[in-house]
Amino acid sequence: MKNSERLFQWFHDVWVDENLDLVEPMFHSDLVVNGPLHGAVAIAEDYREIVGTLRNLVQDIEVTLTHALDDGDLSALRIRVRGLGGSPAYPVDLFGQLTVRMRDGMICEFLSNFDYMTLFEQVGQLPQDCLPICMTGERLTWLNNG
């Protein structure tokens, strides 16, 4: 089995099937994590918490592998994530990439970069078209209703 196939199966089992007992066995003791949540996710227990937090925002998750590359101990995946999020529930549809380095059958370098801005727009936590608005130089301002 290619590393990319093993990685996608693990991702599916953790995120779709919510089998969090698979998290620790896949992370090497020398794990290095990078990406938008760099600093927030450092060890396997943190990853479990991120899964739980995002699973509370998005239900009925489906993941589809759109692209996979393997080069020695490096693997890169492009994944489409679909589900329902927000209240009332709205369709969620976004893409992300995982790039990992494997050692001894485990992930020792982990770069995860998903389109969190689109996710938060789709579940109602950010305004629609947030990225284009921010690119104009406008600032998002939250009102204090208190």
Image: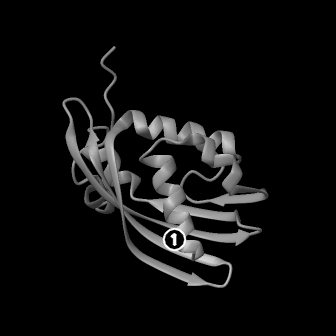
The residue under label 1 is 5
Residue reaching furthest top? 146
Question: In this orientation, does residue 125 appear?
Answer: yes
Residue 21, image x, y percentages: 62, 41
Question: In this orientation, does residue 139 appear?
Answer: no
Q: Quadrant of residue 33?
A: bottom right
Could you say which is closer to the camera, residue 66 or residue 125? 66
Q: Which residue is located at x 36 percent, y 36 percent?
A: 57
Taking the image as shown, residue 141 lies to the left or right of residue 33, namely left
Taking the image as shown, residue 77 lies to the left or right of residue 32, namely left
Q: Does residue 41 lie above or below 144 as drawn?
A: below
Q: Which residue is located at x 26 percent, y 46 percent?
A: 122
Q: Residues within 10 Å of mark 1 (few under 14, many from 20)?
A: some
Q: Which residue is located at x 61 percent, y 47 percent?
A: 22
Q: Which residue is located at x 31 percent, y 58 percent?
A: 94
Residue 114, image x, y percentages: 44, 59
Taking the image as shown, residue 86 lies to the left or right of residue 73, namely left
- Amino acid type at image mark 1: Glu
Say which element carries label 1.
helix
